[in-house]
Image (cartoon, rainbow, N blue to C red):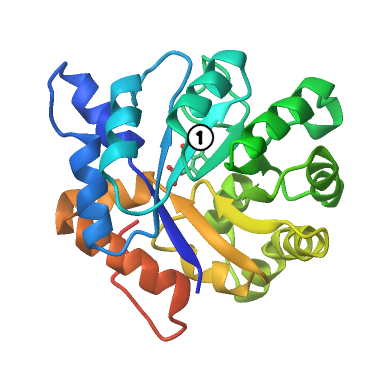
Amino acid sequence: MIRLGVNIDHVATLRNARGETYPSPVQAAAFAELGGADNITCHLREDRRHIRDADVELLRRTIQVPLNFEIAATDEMVRIAGQTRPHAVTLVPEKRQELTTEGGLDLNQASKKLGEQIKALRDLGIVVSLFVEPEVEDMVMAHKLGAQAIEIHSGHYCRKMQEAKTTAEQVALLKPLQEAARVAHDQGLQVHVGHGLNYGNAQWMQHVPHLEEANIGHAIVARAVFVGLPQAVREMKALLNDPQYRPYIGG
Ligand code: PXP
């Protein structure tokens, strides 16, 4: 079974847009759990544009499923992770100007410090995952750095899928993800995927070998506006796991 991690950042974005206390990302997490979310993901960005420190604290205390805490590899964030003690930390690159995380970590430029941060988090019993491009060398580097999991960046794949016209093209686009997943698995890494997945492309993830988890935010929160969060989560889980499931596709 491919686990579904529901990213609830966008609920916080909506709350902050009006300077209100609602909708609450913590309540959203509870509704996502009702729909079968296997974990809850939130990204505490350095500029706190959506999730805030108090949200992380409350999520940690209230959700019943594991928390996947997404952060940049900075001293501040690693310290907060140490205090929060989530089940997992996913380390991502972060630029202030970007709308969302735009690519995987550059592991060729990875410093000794990144290895030390990974070790410090692991020593606290936290599972450490690195958000990386579907490149074979990155899988090997992630293992060398001491990570237990990688989250393969599916953003570029998803963009290209929008333009693919034939099934042959769609199948070919999966190759880099499949190859990266195989190598990651050979290195003993758990294989996760995330970014850009939606109700039109998530079913293809069933063809990625060894895939254990998909982390999905925007598409689920967007669909929840029409069908409610539990239903949006149920539909996405079916897409990830049921080869027969054919949903209404609205985006
Ligand atoms: N995984 C990572 C590492 C991300 O940064 C994001 C975006 O916050 C996601 C998954 C979810 O991406 P999307 O909102 O496109 O589903």
Q: Residue at left 50%, top 35%?
A: 70
User: Looking at this view, is 159 or 199 the one in front?
Assistant: 199
Q: Position of residue 13 (x, y in %)?
A: 28, 27
Secondary structure of the residue carrying numbered label 1: strand
Q: Which residue is mark 1?
A: 70
- Which amino acid, by three-letter code, is at mark 1? Glu
**How busy is the neighbourhood of tag 1: few (under 14 within 10 Å), some, or many (20 plus)?**
many
| Residue 213 is at least partly visible in this image | yes
Residue 249: quarter of image:
bottom left
Q: Residue at left 55%, top 69%?
A: 204
Residue 238: quarter of image:
bottom left
Q: Position of residue 40 (x, y in %)?
A: 38, 47
Numbered disc total: 1
Q: Position of residue 66 (x, y in %)?
A: 41, 50
Q: Look at the image and tell me in which quarter the C terminus lies.
A: bottom left
| Residue 103 is at least partly visible in this image | no
Indicate left or right for 39 with 54 as reference.
right
Q: Is mark 1 within 8 Å of ligand 1?
A: yes
